[in-house]
Amino acid sequence: MDRRNFLLTTGAALTSLSVSPVCLAASHPLPPAVAPGRRLTLSVANRFSADPTVVQANLLARIIQATSATPLQVQVVDAAAVPNADLGLVTASALVDRDAGFAFVTGLPGNQALNAASLDEWLIRGGGQPLLDQLAATHGLKVLAAAHSGDSFLWSRSPFESAADFAGKAVQADGLARHVAAGLGAEPWRILDGEPAASFAQGSLAAVECGIEGLVSAQLHTHTRYAIGGALAPHGTTAALTVKLETWQAFSPAEQALISAAARTNYLESVALNRTMAMLNGRSLAQSFNIAIAPSADALSTAIQTVSRAMVASAAASSTAAKNLNASYMSFLMNPLNSNGENCYV
């Protein structure tokens, strides 16, 4: 089954996850051709029906198992039911809540954001991963970029044209962008506060920032009337694979290389799929559901950049490891040879 069909069929199947909170991959068993071997659990928070993060966890599990010579068996489980899993796929918000320094990997807000391809380049070739390892080690973790949301839009039922439009309104955003929304006067809304589609339809949730896949997966498109490209976190956010450091160090070098390669493969495939979905479906989705898409108004853009710079500076000052990440990241961002660009779907 190709990745696009797997996303669609997995998304449909995940609507019934509440019946089986422990094994989230039960309806999509791993390929039987792989002989029984070492078993690992991969936890993910089941936040709402057809959550893209759960889909990504299933895809990542399949990649690890399919490329393993050991072989490794990977079972995807609900993080709430199995809190001590071997591996975890966590959202940008979960990492940033743990340490603001992780924002340099999960995605910065405003015009300091690297696009998905450039973020990968910085991590792999620009020195970002060793610095991330230093920060993660202070939390007893190994952290690897493992999936990406795609370039983001701020989807809403009423227009957001200035910072005043955020005041007192519930806004869902991921990672450090959630703190930017709060800095603009919004009430940060977590997906766990309720099903996003119902809250959005009822008006208790005023706006959601996510990519095309996130919009459709959460069934928000039928209630959306406005979309701002390049708003809080223009280049989206990264979900990360986390491994307890003692578990990571117990893996053989071959297993470490396998898991690192699987995480990167899943990340790059999610980047490619999100770009294709946005290019093919973004405009048609807007036309079909009468969604007005536009760049940020000048007043709003200025306010976002001001708050974003303050949030990034605060994250950079949070620890020596974060300071080192910031220095490397900003040097890479300012390098005219990197491939970073604007949100290209506006």
Image: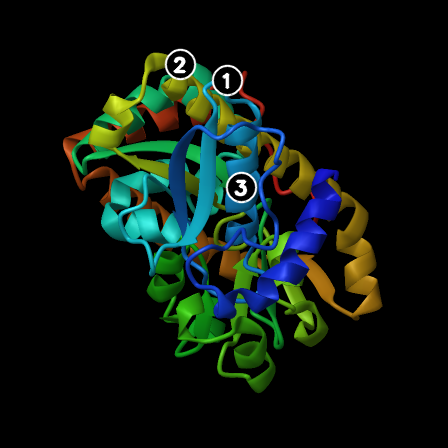
In this view, the residue in front, 35 or 249, is: 35
Which residue was labeled with disc 3?
A: 148
Looking at this view, name the residue that lies furthest to the bottom: 202
Q: How crowded is mark 2: few (under 14 residues within 10 Å), some or many (20 or more)?
A: few
Q: Residue 331: image x %, image y %?
A: 38, 22
Which residue matches tag 1? 69
Q: Which amino acid does label 2 sit on?
A: Ala
List x then y, in percent, for residue 219: 65, 68
Q: Which of marks 3 and 1 is in front?
A: 1
Q: Mark 2 points at which residue?
A: 254
Gap in Å between the C-alphas at discs 2 and 1?
9 Å
Q: Which of marks 2 and 1 is in front?
A: 1
Q: Which of 140 and 67 is in front in this view?
A: 67
Q: What residue type is labelled 1?
A: Ala
Quarter of the figure with the N terminus: top right
* Earlier sequence position, callout 3 versus callout 1: 1
C-beta proximity under 8 Å, tags 2 and 3: no
Q: Where is residue 340 in the image (x, y as percent from the top left)?
A: 56, 29
In the displayed orientation, state which residue is furthest to the front: 36
| Left or right placement of residue 35 versus residue 38 in this view | right
Question: Which quadrant would residue 226 be assigned to in this image?
Answer: bottom right
Dot 2 falls on a residue whose secondary structure is: helix
